[in-house]
Image (cartoon, rainbow, N blue to C red):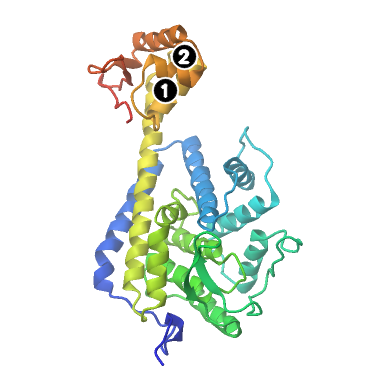
């Protein structure tokens, strides 16, 4: 009888891959890591702290969103800031479930050098489900799953339209499987740290040892190994944000790997590609932070009102279309005359400049330190 899933192979879990097919990707991702870290060094303490908090916020929020659960971003951010001891005047109260998932992510990334143990995984599981004993959604926490409700199926999609990607190993195998996984996790291997992160996520998700929360814990495990690969607790990018963007492809490659043989080259290629795009997006974001910092440094002596600051920050970020006086008035809820005065004031101070080809309405762009205009952010 042929094997249906990868864990049914006689050589499980001795994964193989074609290293020559991965060498170039590994070099490119390592280079991207170095570029990103180098750019972070150019940031001031406040900007670096802001980047770390935003990256962790994205990681927590997007990892949950992959599972169909949307968390309040301000509560996630506030919970992270409190746990990192950051003084943020905008802190808001956060719910227990948010504090729990934040606690897991902080432990995975800030304490990346501490051993991964069964007890630690159980603690993360409790963090994810602090209200597990509720009558609405009772869950078994801090224990491996059982098969009382049937085989564990890994699915994606909306309730009622879910697709089954594979069935996890039977529950009786989990204690031995997890002991083997944890021994490997802490052992010294010849495997590149980035490849180990890719393998760990795949291996853990394949076992699917808990009743619920396996995806989020699996991504936290990958984040922990990525932090080890960088020897840094400072998180400047979010892998989960990129996985969410590529969610369909993620489940496709996960399913095909589960139904293949022990060669996981394709999985590693996808993981490294996804990581590379996450690093690239983070680099672009940091370039934006540096650009904003330089802009405000250039114009630090001028006086501007709150409306002007708001519009300028929008132009420095992702302003859609061209800036006109009517759009200014609509965004800031002021009259057309007030909008025109705000704009002309910034033109006179050298912050804005008229676009040469504005169409029917005059449009404006930010002026850079070289006297040319910034794009109008279409």
Residue 280 image point, x, y percent:
34, 48
Image quadrant where one finds the C terminus: top left
Residue 151 image point, x, y percent:
57, 79
* Callout 1 secondary element: helix
Residue 185 image point, x, y percent:
49, 73
Q: Quadrant of residue 146?
A: bottom right
Q: Residue furthest bottom?
A: 1
Check if mark 2's residue and mark 1's residue have beta carbons within 8 Å. yes
Residue position marked by numbered label 2 in the rendering: 304
Above or below, 127 against 316 in this view is below
Above or below, 192 against 14 in this view is above
Q: Residue at x 31, y 26 (%)?
A: 376
Q: Residue at x 40, y 23 (%)?
A: 297
Disc number lying in front (2 or 1): 1
Q: Residue at x 49, y 19 (%)?
A: 332
Q: Residue at x 30, y 63 (%)?
A: 26
Residue 225 in sight here: yes
Front residue of 127 and 3:
3
**Residue 366 located left or right of residue 232:** left
Distance (Cα) linking label 2 and label 1: 10 Å
Residue position marked by numbered label 1 in the rendering: 312
Mark 2, other Cα within 10 Å: few <14 / some 14–19 / many ≥20: some
Above or below, 200 against 102 in this view is below
Image quadrant where one finds the N terminus: bottom left
Front residue of 290 and 212:
212
């Amino acid at each position: 009888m042929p094997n249906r899933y990868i864990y049914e192979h006689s050589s499980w879990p001795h994964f193989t891959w074609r290293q020559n097919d991965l060498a170039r990707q590994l070099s490119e991702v390592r280079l991207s890591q170095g570029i990103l870290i180098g750019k972070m060094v150019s940031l001031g303490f406040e900007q670096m702290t802001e980047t770390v908090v935003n990256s962790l916020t994205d990681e927590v929020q997007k990892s949950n969103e992959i599972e169909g659960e949307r968390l309040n971003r301000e509560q996630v951010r506030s919970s992270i800031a409190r746990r990192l001891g950051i003084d943020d005047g905008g802190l808001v109260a956060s719910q227990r479930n948010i504090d729990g998932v934040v606690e897991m992510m902080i432990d995975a990334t800030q304490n990346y050098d501490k051993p991964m143990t069964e007890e630690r995984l159980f603690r993360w599981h409790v963090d994810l489900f602090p209200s597990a004993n509720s009558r609405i959604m009772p869950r078994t926490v801090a224990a491996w799953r059982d098969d009382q409700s049937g085989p564990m199926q890994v699915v994606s999609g909306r309730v009622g339209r879910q697709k089954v990607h594979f069935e996890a190993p039977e529950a009786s195998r989990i204690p031995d499987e997890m002991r083997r996984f944890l021994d490997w996790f802490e052992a010294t291997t010849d495997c590149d740290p980035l490849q180990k992160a890719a393998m760990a996520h795949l291996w853990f998700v394949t076992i699917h040892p808990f009743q619920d929360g396996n995806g989020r814990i699996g991504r936290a495990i990958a984040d922990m190994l990525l932090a080890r690969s960088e020897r840094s607790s400072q998180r400047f990018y979010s892998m989960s944000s990129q996985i969410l963007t590529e969610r369909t492809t993620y489940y496709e490659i996960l399913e095909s790997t589960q139904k293949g043989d022990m060669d996981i080259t394709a999985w590693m290629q996808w993981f490294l590609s996804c990581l590379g795009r996450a690093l690239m997006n983070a680099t672009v974001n940091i370039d934006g932070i540096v650009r904003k910092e330089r802009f405000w440094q250039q114009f630090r002596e001028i006086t501007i009102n709150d409306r002007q600051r708001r519009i300028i920050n929008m132009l420095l970020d992702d302003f859609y279309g061209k800036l006109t006086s009517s759009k200014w008035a609509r965004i800031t809820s002021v009259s057309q005359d007030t909008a025109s005065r705000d704009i002309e004031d910034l033109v006179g101070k050298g912050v804005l400049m008229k676009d040469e080809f504005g169409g029917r309405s005059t449009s404006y762009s930010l002026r850079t330190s070289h006297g040319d205009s910034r794009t109008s952010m279409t």
